[in-house]
Image (cartoon, rainbow, N blue to C red):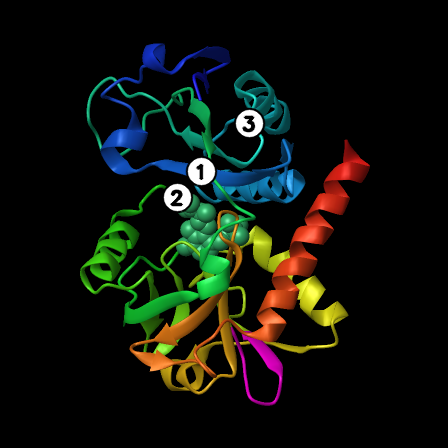
């Protein structure tokens, strides 16, 4: 994927350069979005724009661009069929390093790139993910999609070291979310439980459509935190994200979920989710 976007220009990736005084680099003073692309079309772009603008607002970063057009142009320029668009906005470049940002304001640094990835035929959907739980030591504004991802990276490496696929994080023994996904369970009574939207989790774009699909399948939904113990006793467990879409979880802390195979309802939610986003794309473009 050769063409990237930087501050208004579409340029080859090798010539996209950012200052070492960018606050995104020095303070993670930046927010981002990851938008999935399926069949050459952006999935749920409007919801990503809404969340990006909220993140920018929460940090008082004044940045404006036609986010959809930039993303669409990168898909076209790179001939991307399946994968993702990464879009980042930082507060911009300072004259010298200072925790306080300067007035008058810096002009934001905006960049984006395309990345190929198999989303639909991901073999993980057939075998399911294995998970371990770890304390959630992130800050208390996880609802803002900032680039402070070091703790998530450390946890991904713990998963690698532990021979599992990923980590679900916990506060007071309650699951908050995955390192880069929202976490959900379906209990033995068939109730889908998903952490309520608050400052402890990212309001996932995929989660919105997932909950709509689950409800239309007749599942009861409870938006509340669930414990590690509740998760282990669940009939099914799964995650949602723009890159994994809906992905079954088959093991938590070495404990098999249900019969240890991807859950049937999870599989149906995944199928219905994919069908719904593809239908939405074909009617909007
Ligand atoms: N991550 N929670 C966290 C902490 C995330 O980083 C993400 C997404 C999600 C799911 O959000 P959505 O459904 O809008 O993708 C939940 C992206 C994919 C990433 O950082 O690569």
Mark 2 in CB contact with mark 1 (< 8 angstroms): yes
Q: Report helix, strand or loop for mark 1.
A: strand
Distance, label 2 to label 1, CA atoms, is: 6 Å
The residue tagged 1 is 32
* Extent of the magenta region: 185-193
Seen at 29% across and 78% down, the residue is: 254
Q: Residue at x 52, y 77 (%)?
A: 236
User: Helix, strand, or loop for circle 2?
Assistant: loop
User: Is the residue 216 above or below the residue 110 in the image?
Assistant: below
Locate residue 70 relative to residue 103 in the image: left or right: right
Q: Quadrant of the N terminus?
A: top left
Q: Nearer the viewer, mark 2 or mark 3?
A: 3
Lateral position of residue 129 relative to residue 148, left or right: right
- The numbered dot on residue 146 is 2
Q: Nearer the viewer, residue 176 or 230?
A: 230
Residue 187 inside the magenta-drawn segment: yes
Q: Nearer the viewer, residue 1 or 88?
A: 1
The stretch drawn in magenta includes residue 200: no
> How far, Cα to Cα, is label 3 from label 1?
20 Å
> Which residue lies under the disc numbered 3?
80
**Quadrant where the image shows the C terminus:** top right
Q: Quadrant of residue 167?
A: bottom left
Mark 2 and mark 3: Cα distance apart in space: 25 Å
Q: Is residue 172 above or below residue 128?
A: below
Please name the residue shown 44% across and 87% down the image: 233
Of labels 3 and 1, the one closer to you: 3
């Amino acid at each position: 994927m050769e063409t990237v976007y930087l501050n208004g220009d579409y340029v080859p990736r090798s010539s996209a350069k950012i200052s070492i005084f960018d606050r995104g680099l020095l303070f993670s003073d930046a927010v981002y979005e990851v938008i999935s692309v399926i069949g050459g079309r952006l999935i749920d772009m409007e919801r990503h724009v809404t969340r990006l603008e909220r993140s920018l607002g929460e940090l008082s970063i004044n940045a404006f661009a036609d986010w959809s057009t930039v993303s669409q142009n990168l898909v076209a320029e790179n001939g991307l069929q399946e994968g993702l668009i990464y879009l980042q906005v930082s507060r911009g470049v300072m004259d010298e390093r200072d925790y306080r940002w300067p007035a008058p304001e810096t002009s934001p640094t905006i960049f984006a790139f395309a990345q190929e990835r198999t989303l639909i035929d991901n073999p993980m959907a057939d075998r399911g993910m294995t998970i371990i739980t770890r304390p959630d030591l992130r800050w208390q504004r996880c609802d803002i999609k900032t680039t402070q991802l070091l703790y998530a990276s450390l946890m991904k490496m713990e998963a690698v070291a532990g021979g599992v696929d990923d980590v679900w994080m916990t506060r007071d023994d309650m699951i908050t979310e995955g390192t880069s996904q929202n976490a959900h369970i379906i209990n033995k009574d068939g109730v889908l439980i998903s952490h309520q939207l608050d400052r402890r989790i990212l309001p996932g774009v995929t989660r919105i459509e997932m909950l709509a699909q689950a409800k239309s399948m007749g599942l009861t939904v409870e938006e509340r935190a669930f414990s590690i113990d509740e998760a282990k006793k669940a009939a099914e467990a799964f995650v949602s994200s723009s890159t994994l879409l809906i992905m079954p979880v088959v093991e938590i802390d070495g404990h098999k979920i249900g019969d240890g195979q991807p859950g049937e309802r999870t599989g149906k939610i995944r199928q219905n989710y994919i069908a719904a986003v593809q239908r939405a794309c074909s009617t909007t473009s």
